[in-house]
Image: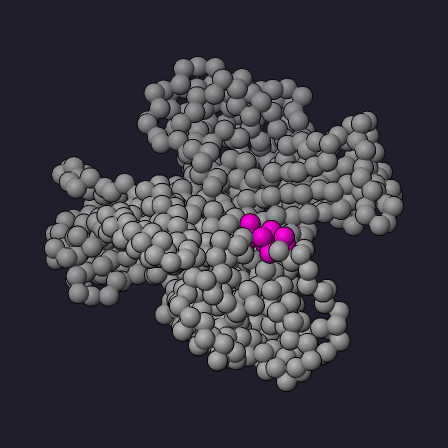
């Protein structure tokens, strides 16, 4: 049989890679709700007159924060990032801008943010044009408006966590959609009302003189909050009545506000919002007003400040799973029995569907057809089915045991984590190349291996079937099936015994078709009769294998660079040539195969190291400016300093982290603290996580954290000391004194 002859040719590679899963996506199907440890986000809609051209249609993201957590307004203040909404809508439908509700001022030390706590709805109007043609829902005859949203937000308390979510919502066209009417009504009531008069803003020295007219009588004489839409313009944390003043002259409101010390904007028109204090707001009455006031006067020279690049938004791809990575298994809440049973069923169903994946289907098809050729020997059928099932399930249990052991060691786990190793990627690429060459007909094992090996294979059919199960798991490793990803993600957070049961269920699902075929004779009778079409199908199934090889070469290129990928391709070509040479006959086979093996050996010795190398980011300059207190962080720099006997203080920070900015301007700028650092000769390193950096992410994870700020004092020969998020002067000085 084709597959049985192939087993021994691939066994050495299969056993080396049996527990090496490939990359898969651990993501649940998008819906209307995304829940993280910090917020509950829901896509909601309101269409009081149905979906039709000219009719008001509103959608929005409703965010419910956990206590003490907050997200941000369009101007986040001293730090933070506003929530972003990216819509995917049918042709003929377009989304407007977010109708931002009035924010609140959230002070943190000598800094302040503008944002939202509790529950907030960010509404967005939809415009439905006359050429909108709704698609019919399959099988129902009904039509609807399919809305898709990808949202990113930054949620902060003491630490800041970038999160994201993908949402879908089907909005019916007919009838009113009023389920969330109260939420949209509240968001509408929190909208700033436009002022009839624009007002004026004058730049005077280092202050802004603001003058507004036309505010309603209910606001006159009240203390108003001031929210500029232009960021980094005023001193956000300034307190009314202390650092800035406001007054009323009849119906005219005036205010004098201090400019930011590191102002980055000099607008000619200032969009701004003023709002009543919460105690002065009346139900059903406007609470805030907006205008775009022209600016006069000469702006003072702004202090230089690094701008936040739009590339910063890439950092928001981290999700709630990133935040949960720092939670130890013992901190996980107990799972309900019903949930675990559902996960077991999902794992078994996922393993069953895995048989339909391109990687696995060729093996299953060849095994079942080979089984059909043994018609009449029911005992052999059952034995082969049990041996194959044993190989599959034991391989998955070995895989699960490896993952649990790594989890216990504190590693960040996921299905496909072994593909971070270039050696594993190269081994899998070689394995799939061999499978593809076999399926396309370049070689048959009986022609490429000594006769003694073939006879040994024939004497041990049970071992052959067991190894075919091992091989099936190896081939399945780059694939994921429906239900499988969720169950594997669930397994990682379970106790060891329950997690292993999930892996066993996954293996049982993968082996189930062949096992059933071994015990139910009627299945064999349902199989199609072998014929010439089998050769065509077999060769067709080789191309998914070659596609997997192409993907693995690309993965290696990300790890080892273009030289590593090119070297792997060259070695795969040499391997294919050697396999072809072994199919020849007589002395020609010996001569050509010997030459090719020798050439491959020399090529491997010369450039093979390119495959195993890991391309590192550009290294820091070996010497730093002697007058520069803070140096850029890298793992190599920390190792060099500690090996030289010098203690290191690491500030894991980000531009959007308000606590980081507060600690940076307060404790880490204190003269006494800096003097202690100097007296102890502590090297001060700053790891800037503003943009996603895998090295910094790994360092945070290794320290049991998933967000910033994080402060670490590391002395040679001692365990790192992790300080608190709100960094106190006394705490830092005490830690330094203990060195």
Above or below residue 174? Residue 349 is below
- Toward which corner of the image does residue 558 lie, by quadrant? top left
Q: Report whether 58 appears left or right of 350.
A: right
Residue at (39% x, 50% y) in the render: 577
Q: Residue at x 49, y 76 (%)?
A: 458
The residue depicted at 60 percent of the width and 78 percent of the height is 385
Q: Quadrant of residue 375?
A: bottom right
Residue 65 on image: x %, y %:
57, 54
Based on the picture, tell me whether residue 571 belongs to the magenta stretch: no
Q: Main secondary structure of the magenta part?
A: helix
Residue 687 x/y as whole percent: 31, 47
Q: Tell me the magenta residue range.
A: 536-544
Q: Is residue 712 visible?
A: yes
Name the spot of residue 322 as percent of width and height, x first: 47, 56
Q: Is residue 483 visible?
A: no
Describe residue 126's horizontal placement relative to residue 114 as left or right: right
Position of 599 compared to 460: left or right?
Answer: left
Q: Residue at x 81, y 47 (%)?
A: 138
Q: Which image quarter holds the C terminus?
A: bottom left
The front one of 592 and 120 is 592
Q: How many marks?
A: 0
Farthest residue to the bottom: give it.
379
Picture coordinates of residue 497, whole percent (x, y): 51, 79
Image height of 479 relative to 152, above or below: below
Q: Is residue 539 magenta?
A: yes
Using the image as rendered, state which of residue 436 and residue 695 is in the foreground: 436
């Amino acid at each position: 049989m084709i597959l049985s002859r192939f087993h021994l040719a691939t066994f050495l590679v299969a056993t080396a890679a049996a527990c090496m899963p490939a990359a898969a996506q651990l993501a649940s199907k998008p819906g209307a709700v995304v829940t993280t440890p910090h917020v509950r986000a829901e896509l909601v809609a309101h269409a009081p007159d149905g979906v039709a051209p000219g009719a008001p249609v509103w959608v929005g993201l409703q965010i419910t924060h956990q206590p003490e957590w907050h997200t941000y307004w369009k101007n986040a203040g001293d730090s933070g990032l506003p929530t972003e909404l990216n819509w995917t809508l049918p042709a003929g439908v377009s989304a407007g801008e977010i109708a931002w509700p009035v924010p609140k001022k959230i002070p943190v030390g000598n800094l302040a943010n503008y944002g939202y706590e509790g529950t907030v709805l960010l509404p967005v109007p939809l415009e439905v044009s006359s050429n909108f043609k709704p698609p019919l829902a399959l099988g129902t005859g009904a039509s609807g408006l399919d809305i898709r949203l990808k949202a990113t937000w930054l949620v902060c308390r003491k630490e800041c966590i970038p999160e994201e979510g993908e949402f879908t919502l089907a909005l019916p066209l007919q009838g009113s959609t009023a389920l969330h009417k109260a939420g949209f009504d509240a968001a509408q009531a929190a909208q700033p009302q436009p002022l009839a008069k624009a007002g004026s803003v004058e730049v005077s020295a280092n202050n802004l003189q603001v003058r507004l007219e036309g505010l309603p009588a209910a606001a006159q004489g009240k203390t108003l909050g001031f929210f500029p839409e232009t960021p980094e313009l005023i001193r956000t944390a300034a307190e009314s009545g202390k650092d800035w003043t406001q007054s009323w002259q009849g119906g005219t409101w005036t205010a004098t506000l201090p400019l930011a010390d590191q102002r980055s904007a000099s607008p000619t028109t200032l969009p701004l919002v003023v709002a009543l204090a919460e105690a002065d707001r009346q139900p059903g009455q406007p609470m805030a007003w907006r205008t775009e006031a022209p600016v006069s006067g000469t702006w003072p020279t702004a202090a230089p400040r690094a701008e936040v690049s739009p590339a910063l938004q890439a950092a928001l791809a981290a999700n709630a799973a990133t935040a949960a990575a720092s939670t130890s298994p013992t901190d996980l809440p107990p799972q309900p029995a019903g949930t675990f049973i559902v996960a077991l069923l999902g794992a078994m169903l996922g393993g069953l569907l895995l048989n339909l994946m391109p990687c696995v289907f060729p093996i299953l098809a060849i095994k079942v057809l080979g089984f059909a050729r043994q018609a009449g020997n029911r005992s052999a059928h059952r034995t082969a089915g049990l041996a194959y099932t044993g190989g599959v399930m034991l391989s998955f249990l070995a895989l699960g045991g490896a993952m649990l052991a790594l989890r216990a060691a504190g590693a960040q786990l996921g299905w496909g984590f072994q593909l971070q190793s270039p050696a594993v990627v190269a081994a899998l690429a070689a394995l799939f190349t061999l499978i593809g060459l076999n399926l396309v007909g370049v070689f048959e094992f009986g022609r490429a291996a000594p006769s003694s090996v073939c006879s040994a294979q024939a004497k041990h059919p049970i071992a052959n079937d067991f190894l075919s199960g091992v091989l099936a798991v190896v081939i399945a490793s780059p694939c994921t099936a429906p239900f499988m990803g969720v169950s594997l993600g669930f397994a990682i957070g379970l106790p060891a015994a329950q997690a292993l049961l999930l892996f066993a269920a996954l293996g049982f699902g993968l082996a189930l078709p062949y096992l059933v075929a071994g015990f139910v004779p009627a299945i064999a009778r349902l199989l199609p009769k072998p014929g010439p079409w089998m050769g065509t199908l077999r060769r067709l199934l080789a191309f998914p294998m070659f596609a997997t090889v192409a993907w693995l070469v690309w993965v290696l290129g990300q790890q080892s660079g273009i030289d590593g990928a090119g070297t792997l391709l060259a070695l795969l070509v040499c391997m294919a040539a050697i396999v072809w040479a072994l199919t020849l006959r007589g002395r020609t086979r010996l001569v050509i195969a010997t030459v090719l093996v020798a050439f491959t050996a020399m090529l491997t010795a010369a450039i093979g190291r390119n495959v195993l190398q890991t391309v590192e980011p550009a290294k820091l300059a070996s010497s730093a400016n002697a007058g520069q207190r803070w140096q850029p962080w890298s793992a190599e720099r920390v190792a060099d300093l500690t090996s030289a006997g010098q203690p290191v203080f690491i500030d894991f920070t980000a531009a959007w982290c308000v606590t980081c900015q507060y600690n940076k301007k307060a404790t880490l700028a204190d003269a006494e603290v800096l003097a202690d650092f100097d007296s102890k000769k502590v090297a001060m390193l700053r790891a800037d996580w503003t943009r996603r950096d895998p090295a910094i992410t790994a360092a945070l994870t290794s320290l049991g954290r998933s967000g910033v700020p994080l402060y670490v004092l590391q002395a040679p020969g001692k365990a790192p000391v992790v300080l608190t998020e709100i960094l106190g002067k006394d705490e830092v000085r005490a830690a330094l004194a203990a060195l």
